[in-house]
Amino acid sequence: MDQGQYDSAWTKVRNAFIRDHPSCQWPGCGARADEVDHVVPVRVDPSRRLDVTNLRSLCLHHHRSVSARASNRRKG
């Protein structure tokens, strides 16, 4: 997500989401969530940026894993 998308609206949605979903939602993980991930990336559908049905809480490990895979798909 580019820096322009980290606005007060995103911060409010993100903080509420992670408060309501404090554990990593990666199947079988359950660690403390550190990040909120967009299931459908914002670059694919910007209209879903603040849509809570498009979010999932992830631990740092799984968020990095998802982000790395997405980056590799964009490169290849």
Image: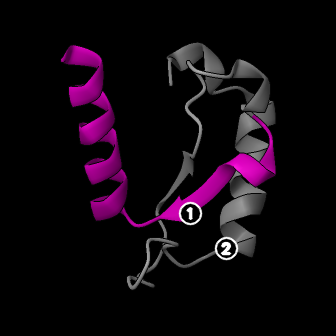
- Give yes or no for residue 67 being in the magenta stretch: yes
Image x and y of residue 7, in percent: 71, 26
* Picture layout, residue 23 above or below residue 61: below
Identify the image quadrant of residue 22.
bottom right
Disc 1 marks a residue whose amino acid type is: Ser
Numbered circles on residues, count: 2
Image x and y of residue 43, in percent: 56, 18
Disc 1 target residue: 57
Give, as a single range, the part of the protein colored magenta: 50-76
**Label 2, label 1: how many angstroms apart (C-alpha)?**
6 Å
* Picture layout, residue 28 above or below residue 45: below
Who's the residue at 41% across and 82% down the image?
Answer: 31
Disc 2 target residue: 21
CB of mark 2 within 8 Å of CB of mark 1?
yes
* Picture layout, residue 9 above or below residue 56: above
Image x and y of residue 62, in percent: 33, 61
Image x and y of residue 49, in percent: 72, 31
Indicate the quadrant containing the C terminus: top left, top right, bottom left or bottom right.
Answer: top left
Who's the residue at 76% across and 32% down the image?
Answer: 48
